[in-house]
């Protein structure tokens, strides 16, 4: 392992290292975006992460081939499907979130990108798509954002198609400005909400479980049947569909603060959430999807970037509420205090050696979320001037979750 990582470390801020092998893997069109119903084909995310970690291209190719042959879920990815219709500007919204004809949407965005260029495609279509960023456990967002990070055109086309395919709205149209919250930062907003949960834990937890268990309610009709087979995706879709005043109350920092500052502060926030429950599969996605949303926002005109922050904040609260519990504010404060001023010397060879070990461990992980975690955390460690928080979080690997009993039923196409 040492010869495939330590000697091939990417410099800070450059994103994934490009090679003919990496470009070939990201340009590949032979596999469907999902398998076994609604499980996301993550292999290109892993390729971007491994390239960003400086892993030898031959080892990346081996990782890719092993994944598509046998995923951590015990089955192979599925072959690409043929388009069943022609999507145009007149009908492209008709199947939003209907989980059908991914290939037709790839054809549509491929064509539009050739006609308009990617910046204009993003500017024109993302306002319709970003409210659904939390769909597919945020993997459609990850696909697009990590494509932009890697600078790969075809993967970006797939990301746009997947956002259309898997759209589950967080309903930003319901948001309203918070009152009496002047001076809050993202961390203050989270602690305030955590405090409400602490005071009303039983009531709120019971409300969430009743909401999820009620399969007779009218909003269920808007949730694709395949998501009911999912477990986590169903809970998120149900919560986002129902909403809550705390989810839709928008603090002033969302719209008034420089989005770049918000992304930095939100990254600290979600990393502390992850350390409060290390290894939590769902919380890890908030980290890797934030990395994606940041790249998406940066690719948009300045007047659209606050909307990306708004969607992200609304969506992560929906995800957190959907679990039926919330991290305790006392634990969050203790973790924040622990890491608040902790900095590593980025030029100290001891830390370079530790990152080499983390990269080496990540490459051996069949669960591809782990190299993604290390990639994002190392990027933020460098951006932040060596915040120890990110180095510690990078080593908290997750495990592939067991599939729920609902997977004994066949997928719903």
Image: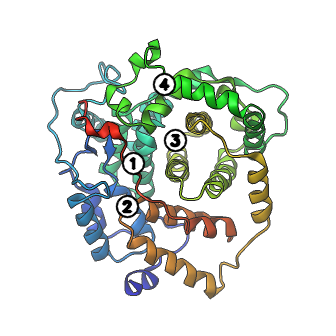
**Which is more foreground, mark 2 or mark 3?**
2
As measured in the structure, the alpha-carbon distance from the residue carrying label 2 to the one carrying label 3 is 25 Å
Tell me, yes or no, whether the two marked residues, 1 and 3, touch with CB atoms within 8 Å. no
Q: Secondary structure under badge 3?
A: loop
Q: Residues within 10 Å of mark 2 (few under 14, many from 20)?
A: many
**Which is more foreground, mark 4 or mark 1?**
4
Q: Tell me where residue 277 sits by quadrant.
A: bottom right
Q: Residues within 10 Å of mark 3 (few under 14, many from 20)?
A: some
Q: Which residue is mark 1?
A: 143
Q: Tell me where residue 196 sits by quadrant.
A: top right
As measured in the structure, the alpha-carbon distance from the residue carrying label 4 to the one carrying label 2 is 35 Å
Label annotation for residue 46: 2
Image x and y of residue 403, in percent? 36, 46
Q: Residues within 10 Å of mark 4 (few under 14, many from 20)?
A: few
Q: Which residue is mark 4?
A: 213
Q: Which residue is mark 3?
A: 300
As measured in the structure, the alpha-carbon distance from the residue carrying label 4 to the one carrying label 1 is 31 Å
Q: Secondary structure under badge 1?
A: helix
Image x and y of residue 263, in percent? 64, 49
Whichever of labels 2 and 3 marks the residue nearer the N terminus, that label is 2
As measured in the structure, the alpha-carbon distance from the residue carrying label 1 to the one carrying label 2 is 10 Å
Tell me, yes or no, whether the two marked residues, 3 and 4, touch with CB atoms within 8 Å. no
Residue at image x 62%, y 70%?
391
Whichever of labels 3 and 4 marks the residue nearer the N terminus, that label is 4
């Amino acid at each position: 392992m040492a010869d495939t990582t330590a000697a091939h470390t990417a410099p800070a801020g450059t994103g994934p290292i490009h090679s003919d092998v990496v470009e070939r893997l990201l340009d590949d069109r032979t596999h469907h975006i999902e398998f076994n119903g609604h499980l996301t084909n993550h292999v290109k995310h892993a390729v971007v992460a491994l390239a960003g970690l400086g892993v030898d291209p031959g080892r990346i190719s081996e990782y890719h081939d092993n994944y598509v042959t046998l995923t951590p879920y015990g089955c192979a990815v599925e072959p690409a499907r043929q388009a069943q219709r022609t999507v145009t500007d007149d009908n492209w919204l008709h199947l939003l979130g209907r989980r059908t004809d991914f290939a037709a949407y790839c054809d549509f965005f491929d064509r539009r990108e050739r006609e308009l260029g990617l910046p204009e495609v993003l500017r024109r279509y993302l306002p319709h798509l970003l409210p659904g960023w939390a769909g597919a456990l945020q993997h459609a967002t990850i696909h697009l954002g990590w494509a932009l990070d890697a600078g790969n055109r075809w993967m970006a086309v797939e990301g746009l198609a997947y956002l259309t395919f898997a759209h589950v709205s967080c309903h930003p149209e319901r948001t309203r400005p918070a009152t009496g919250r002047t001076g809050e930062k993202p961390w203050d907003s989270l602690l305030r909400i955590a405090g409400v949960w602490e005071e009303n834990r039983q009531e709120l937890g019971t409300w969430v479980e009743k909401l999820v268990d009620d399969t007779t309610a009218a909003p269920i009709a808007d949730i694709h049947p395949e998501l009911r087979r999912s477990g986590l995706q169903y809970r998120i879709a149900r919560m986002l569909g129902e909403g809550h005043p705390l989810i839709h109350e928008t603090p002033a920092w969302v719209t008034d603060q420089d989005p770049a500052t918000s992304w930095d502060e939100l990254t600290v926030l979600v990393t502390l959430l992850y350390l409060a429950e290390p290894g939590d599969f769902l919380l890890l996605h908030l980290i890797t999807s934030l990395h994606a949303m940041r790249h998406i926002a940066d690719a948009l005109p300045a007047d659209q970037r606050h909307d990306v922050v708004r969607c992200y904040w609304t969506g992560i609260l929906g995800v957190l509420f959907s679990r039926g519990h919330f991290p305790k504010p006392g634990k969050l404060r203790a973790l924040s205090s622990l890491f608040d001023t902790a900095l590593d010397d980025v030029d100290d060879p001891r830390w370079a050696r530790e990152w080499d070990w983390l990269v080496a461990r990540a490459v051996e992980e069949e669960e591809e979320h782990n190299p993604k975690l290390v990639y994002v955390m190392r990027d933020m460690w460098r951006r932040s001037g060596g915040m120890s928080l990110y180095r510690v979080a990078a080593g908290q690997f997750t495990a592939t979750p067991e599939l729920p009993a609902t997977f004994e039923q066949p997928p719903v196409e």
